[in-house]
Image (cartoon, rainbow, N blue to C red):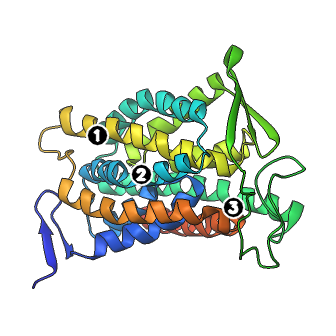
């Protein structure tokens, strides 16, 4: 049996097992931070599979649609979904995705320019993640529990290495207290947290522009912002971020499939390749959401941050080289 498969839409020719395997590994790690992993799959498709047309962004959206629901389901099941935040992210991001589509098609169809754009996006996200890691390590070190909350944190101490048992208490769940006057207040493990809906909508709109052009749904950007700027615990941000990513990805793939582009420019997704990535991502997303409470978040953020900065440096240097 020949496992080397050709995908006519994208022109990609690769081993059948490679896309789902890569997607599983990426989504397993990224879903713990409320990120689908599409921002890493796109560089993989550009550099390794040589898929550089605007269709690659649409294909990334297909991956999100297939993979993300399993992670969302897991966070809902564990009662760690902040629904007002989830809908704020989704509704704010949708109009941004439309604008991002036109930016991608009209101003960034050239592969070299798109690589520079990708590099800048990755660099920004990586710096944000590493900045949060540095701040957390400076305050508590790696051994302390890191929920992103004010003291006292709603987590139990982990062992010396941060592994071995859940960082969350068994009764950890989200309880919405108020949504009055545009301010959402909820309780998580005995601590109250809040965010303004208007601020969330503005942030989500900006994220939607970048996500629409990049084909990532926006979770890779908005999740670190919710933790660093809104001071919300990542344990409650992850599910909402993934939910928003799924909704905006549906809109994104529709735009890339329906709205006409420049003559001769391919924008429709490679459904076969996207679904193949999505199948691996579906399993990885569920497993990642399931084991999130066992893994020190500082280590996850540090690994993702270093990965992003490295990829960004490669793309930016290649553009100017």
Give the secondary structure at mark 2: helix
Residue at x 73% of width, y 58% of height: 168
Q: Is residue 253 left or right of residue 229?
A: left
Instruction: Please tell me which residue lies in front, 67 or 215.
Output: 67
**Mark 3 highlights which residue?**
130
Quadrant assignment, res 169: bottom right
Marked residue nearer the N-terminal end (1 or 3): 1
Instruction: Decide: is 266 above or below 11.
Output: above
Q: CA distance from mark 1 to mark 3?
A: 31 Å
**Mark 2 highlights which residue?**
68
Q: Position of residue 152 (x, y in %)?
A: 90, 50
How many C-alpha atoms fall within 10 Å of the one at disc 2: few (<14), some, or many (≥20)?
many
Residue at x 42% of width, y 56% of height: 38
Q: Is residue 134 among what the camera can see?
A: yes
Give the secondary structure at mark 1: helix
Marked residue nearer the N-terminal end (3 or 2): 2
Q: CA distance from mark 1 to mark 2?
A: 25 Å
């Amino acid at each position: 049996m020949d496992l080397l498969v050709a995908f006519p839409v994208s022109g990609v020719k690769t081993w059948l097992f490679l896309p789902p395997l890569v997607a599983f590994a990426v989504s397993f790690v990224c879903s713990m931070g409320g990120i689908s992993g599409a921002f890493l799959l796109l560089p993989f498709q550009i550099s390794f599979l040589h898929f550089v047309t605007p269709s690659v962004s649409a294909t990334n959206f297909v991956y999100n649609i297939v993979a993300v629901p399993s992670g969302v389901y897991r966070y809902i099941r564990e009662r760690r979904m902040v629904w007002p935040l989830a809908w704020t992210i989704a509704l704010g991001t949708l109009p941004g995705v439309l604008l991002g589509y036109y930016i991608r098609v009209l101003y960034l169809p050239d592969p070299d320019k798109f690589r520079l754009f990708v590099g800048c996006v990755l660099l920004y996200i990586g710096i944000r993640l590493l900045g949060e890691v540095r701040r957390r390590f400076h305050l508590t070190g790696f051994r302390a529990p890191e929920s992103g909350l004010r003291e006292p944190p709603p987590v139990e101490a982990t062992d010396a290495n941060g592994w071995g048992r859940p960082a969350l208490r068994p009764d950890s769940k989200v309880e919405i207290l108020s949504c009055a006057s545009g301010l959402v207040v909820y309780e998580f493990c005995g601590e109250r947290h809040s965010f303004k809906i208007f601020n969330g909508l503005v942030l989500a709109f900006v994220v939607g522009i970048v996500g629409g052009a990049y084909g990532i749904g926006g979770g890779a950007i908005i999740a670190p912002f919710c933790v660093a700027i809104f001071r919300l615990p990542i344990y409650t941000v992850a599910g909402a971020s993934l939910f928003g990513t799924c909704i905006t990805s549906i809109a994104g793939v529709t735009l890339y499939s329906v709205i006409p582009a420049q003559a001769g420019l391919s924008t429709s997704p490679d459904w076969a390749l996207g679904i193949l990535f999505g199948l691996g991502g579906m399993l990885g997303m569920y497993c990642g959401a399931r084991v999130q409470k066992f893994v020190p978040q500082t280590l996850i953020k540090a690994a993702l941050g270093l990965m992003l900065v490295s990829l960004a440096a490669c793309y930016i240097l290649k553009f100017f080289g």
